[in-house]
Image (cartoon, coloured by chain):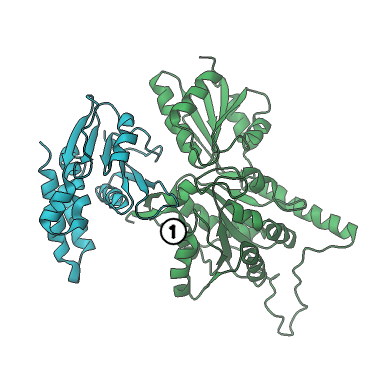
Chain colours: A cyan, B green
Amino acid sequence: MAYNEILISGFGGQGVMAIGLTLAEAGMSEGMNVSWLPSYGPEMRGGTANCGVVIADSEIISPIVLEPSELIAMNLPSLDKFEPHVKKGGTIFVNESIIQRKVQRGDVRAIYVPSMEIASGIGNMRVANMAMLGAFIKATQLLKYDTIIAMLTQLFTGSKAHLVGLNEEALERGAACVD
Amino acid sequence: MAKELWKGNEAVAEAAIRAGCRCYFGYPITPQSEIPEYMALHMADTGGVFLQSESEIAAINMVYGASGAGARVMTSSSSPGISLKQEGISYMCGAELPAVIVNVMRGGPGLGTIQPAQGDYFQATRGGGNGDYRLIVLAPATIQEVVDLMQEAFDLADQYRIPVMMLLDGMIGQMMEPVEWTHTPASDLPGKTWATTGTEGKRPPNIINSLFIDPDACNRHNQHLEEKYKKIIENEIKYSINDLVDAEILFVAYGTPSRLARAAARLLGEEGIKAGVFRPISVWPYPYDALREAASQDSVQAVVTVEMSTGQMVDDVRIGVNGVKPVSFIGQAGGVIPSPREVADAAKKALGR
C-alpha cells in the first residue's frame, strides 16, 4: 500500500512548488489520490518555500506533511530544518550543488544530486529541479517515468517543444545519481 | 468524468460560476485573493460582472444591491475583511437577501496573520452584526466538498432568501486536490417575485428594506425571520461521522481540523484505542441532536473537540453533548496547526491514560 508523504523545500525561485505540482499531477494521472499543500508567506523570490505532497492509493486523511517519508532539500536551511523530521527508513534527496554537508542521520537513505551542474551541463539552469525529480522517481519507484514524459509533452508544445528533450535529459541525469 | 487538480480558492470561484453566479464584488486579501483573481479572468466570459471595489464595505453593499435586483451574487474575503462586511450581512438578513459570502479564515484578532485559522467561528455562527439574525454557515473539509457545497449554497440562499456563508480556512484555500466536476441539476426554486426589477407599470413596486420603525411591525418581522430559521434548523443540518463503531474517543472538528482528527484517530488505532470523528458540515444550523446521539453511544468515554482556535465551536459541542459525556478541547491559534500527535495525546489524557 502506497502512502507517501513528500516534503519539497528550498528558496523561492528554485522550482519547489513546480516539483510538488508535477508529482501531484503525475500521481493523479496514475489514478492515485493526491494532495498539494504549499506553505505560503509574504516572501516571493528568495524567501523560503516548501510544499507537502501526499500520494496514496488509499484515501488521503490529512494533507499536512509533518513527518515526510521523502524530503527533497533544495538548500541548506531546508535540510537543517527538516532532516530530523523524516520518517525512519525514509529518503532525503540533497541538492548537492549548494548544500555542502552530508545527511547526518544513519536511519534514512541519502541521495545526492548536483542539480545545478547537471542543468548547466544541459545548457538551461531552469531544469535543475527536474534533475531532483529524476532522482526521486528512480529511487522511490512511486511514479512511472513515462507519466512525467507524457506530462512534459503536453505542457511544452509548438515553439516550446524543444524543452521536452532538455527536461528529459535532466530527469535521466538526475536518475543516474541513484545507485 | 476525469479528475482535475484544483486549488481551493480557484475551485470556489469556478464552482460559483458553474452554479450560475453572475456578479462578484470583492477586495483582495490573503489567503483568498485567487478567488477575485479567478473571477476577474473568467466572469466576463459568462456575461457576468466582476468588480474590485474600493473596500470590503463597498463590496458587501454592492452584493446587497445586486441581490435586491435578483442576481446570483457573491463576495469573498478573509477574516479582517469579513469583519468589515458584518453590517452589510446584518442588513441583508434583515432585508432577506440571498447571497453567498466566502470567508477563507486566517489568524486574528485584528490583522493577525495570513496563516490558516478558525477564530471566526463565533462571528460566523453568532453573528458579527447587530440584531436577531442567523445565516446558514457551511464548512467543507476537502476541495471536492467545497465544489459540491458551492452549488448548494447558492440554492439554499435563494430558497430561504438568506445569506449563506462558506466558512473555509486558509489551508483549504491554498491547497490543491483532485476535483470531479459533476453536473448538479438546478434546484426547483421559486422565481424572485420580490426582486426590484422594475414594475413596468404592471404591479406595485417591490420594496427591499430592513427598517421597521414601528416596534410591533419590527417584532412581527423578527418573528417571521425566526419561523424561517426554525425551518432551516429542521431541514438543512449536515454532518458526517467516521469510525464510530466501538469508539472510545469521539473527536469533534470541522474543516481542516477534522482531517487532523482523523490522522490522530489513526495514531490512536496503532495503540489499540478506537476513535471516531464527528464532523459538522453545517455549523449553523448545528447538528446538536446527532452529536448527542453519537456521544451517547456506550463505548464513548470522552468527547474531544479539535479547532484551529483557542476554543469556540467547543461551546456548541457542550450544548450538543449536554453533559452525557465529558467534553475537552485541544487547539492552536494564530496560524499554528495542531499536530495529529498533539491531538492524539489530548485524547489519551481525556481517557486518563
Q: Residues within 10 Å of mark 1 (few under 14, many from 20)?
A: many
Depth check, front residue: A50 or B25: A50
Side (left or right) of B303 relative to A176:
right
Find the residue positioned furthest to the bottom.
Answer: B201
Residue placed at 27% from the left, 41% from the top? Answer: A73
- The picture places residue A41, in percent across and down from the top left corner, at 44, 49
Side (left or right) of B76 relative to B11:
right
Q: Secondary structure at mark 1?
A: helix
The N terminus of chain B is located in which quarter?
bottom left
User: Total marks drawn?
Assistant: 1
| Amino acid residing under circle 1 | Glu
Residue placed at 56% from the left, 27% from the top? Answer: B304
Side (left or right) of A148 relative to B99:
left
- The picture places residue B34, in percent across and down from the top left corner, at 46, 59
Residue placed at 56% from the left, 59% from the top? Answer: B76
Q: Chain of mark 1?
A: B
Depth check, front residue: B88 or A12: A12
- Above or below B343: residue B67: below
Side (left or right) of B19 relative to B163:
left
Residue that mark 1 sits on: B10
Query: Which quadrant would residue B66 be assigned to in this image?
Result: bottom right
- Above or below B252: residue B103: below
- The picture places residue B128, in percent across and down from the top left corner, at 69, 50
Query: Which quadrant would residue B56 be assigned to in this image?
Result: bottom right
Q: Is residue B185 visible?
A: no
Residue placed at 47% from the left, 74% from the top? Answer: B44
- The picture places residue B292, in percent across and down from the top left corner, at 63, 30
Depth check, front residue: B137 or B31: B31
Find the residue positioned furthest to the front.
Answer: A100
Q: Is residue B347 visible?
A: yes
